[in-house]
Amino acid sequence: MANRPPLPSEGVNDTVTRIRAFLDTYRPPTPCLVVDVDTVVDRYRRLATAFPGSRVQYAVKANPHPAVLRALVAAGAAFDVASPGEIDLCLAAGADPASLSYGNTVKKPSAIAHAHAAGVREYTFDAESDVDNLARYAPGSQVSARVLVQGGPDSVTPFGHKFGCHVDEAVRLLLRAAGKGLDPVGVGFHVGSQQLDPSAWDVAVASAAKVFAATAEHGVNLRRLNVGGGFGISYSDPAPATSVYADAVTAAVRAHFAQPPELVCEPGRAVVAEAGLVRSEVVVVSRKLPTDPHRWVYLDVGRYNGLAETENEAIAYRLDVVGPHSQEDGPVIIAGPTCDGDDVLYQRTPYRLPLSLRPGDVIDILAAGAYTASYSSVAFNGIEPLRTYCISEGRLISGE
Ligand SMILES: *Cc1c(COP(=O)(O)O)cnc(C)c1O
């Protein structure tokens, strides 16, 4: 699986080439994440083109680096924010508060008040207490109900049952919101992150359509459908093309809505993942016994300083060994640098690396721009958070 050349997904190779040229000249200490901001903008534009007429809201949590946000503001993106901190980051990057949507359904009254004072006028809820808090602390705002997606295919990193409510509860809460002077605009959902089965959207859009029909019977006419994020990208397993996702969403909306609603989509991973590369160094290569078939390969990056999504081996990153190596390879177990037994990246997923691999060798982790730096711990084992360097036109524009 690993150590095979990048998949022929257009743009990835150019991005990797540009990032490596930067790394060759700048030589930052490893591990580090390098984000090619031009690729971020390119992926945003591709999504906006694939979903014509839709509002594309970048889910900030995937990579909240200020240089990423500034580039997306300049490209005209809207943003899905989850906390006062993310709101402030977007505003500092120059975003118009009207382009922010507060999609997290778990929020304190103080967070709502902060968002409202900042000018945020769009919120999502899935619980009665949140509706009441919104009516009180963000009066008159546009609100949507998030519905639970049930019965669809699982994604690679599912949200489980944490977010969203049943269709009937969404109807009740939207009517309650209307009664409290809020502006109930629509329904949202998320089919799970790195969703490789585009048919997942059909199940969810069908639920949303039920909510539209039921509220209309009570005189509340919804107009906006937020189809969430979840669009996959190619790691070791290839993902469908953006156009395949867009066709599936469009077909689902056509099948379940007589009158097409305003569409919103909220990609996180699909905007930033392919724009980033994590450069890491091999620290130790060992065998528990000289006769063991498996080598253990310990890297300077692991679960706690950037590769959180290797939990349960959910995301199988493409690894690319840099420099001349033997053609011959062998099976490996790959682990991170900390003194934590869970800091093992891959032991079930069959990775192979060259037999010539030695401490000090460099391994690039491809398509690592999403959910890496933002998931990095502050100082576990004294290891600093994953440093991010942003480049544009091959040059450093922001390094932290
Ligand atoms: C995380 C999140 C997204 C983005 O999901 P991806 O799988 O990265 O596209 C979108 N909307 C909400 C509400 C989220 O929490």
Image: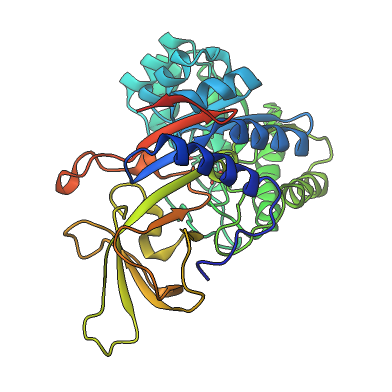
Image vertical order of residue 112 relative to residue 218, above or below: above
**Residue 159, position as x, y percentages in the image:** 46, 52
**Left-right relation of 137 to 6:** left
Say which quarter of the image contains residue 40. top right
Does residue 161 appear to the left or right of 232 in the view shown? left
Question: Would residue 195 be seen by someone viewing this image from the given angle?
Answer: yes
Q: Quadrant of residue 203?
A: bottom right
Where 321 falls versus 48 (above or below)? below
Residue 31 appears at what percent x and percent y?
A: 34, 46
Which residue is pictured at 70% across the width and 50% down the height?
206
The chosen color scheme is rainbow
Q: Is residue 247 left or right of residue 190?
A: right
**Residue occupying image coordinates x 71% and y 28%:** 223
In the image, residue 271 lies at what x, y percent? 59, 38
Lateral position of residue 212 relative to residue 150, left or right? right
Q: Quadrant of the C terminus?
A: top left
Residue 128 in the image: x percent, y percent?
42, 33
Q: Depth check: give the residue in front, 385 or 377.
A: 385
Q: Which residue is found at the position 36% from the left and 30% from the top?
A: 107
Q: Is residue 62 visible?
A: no
| Vertical comparison of 383 with 84: above or below | below
Farthest bottom residue in view: 291
Return the residue nearer the eye: 384 or 372: 384
The residue closer to the viewer here, 205 or 277, is: 277
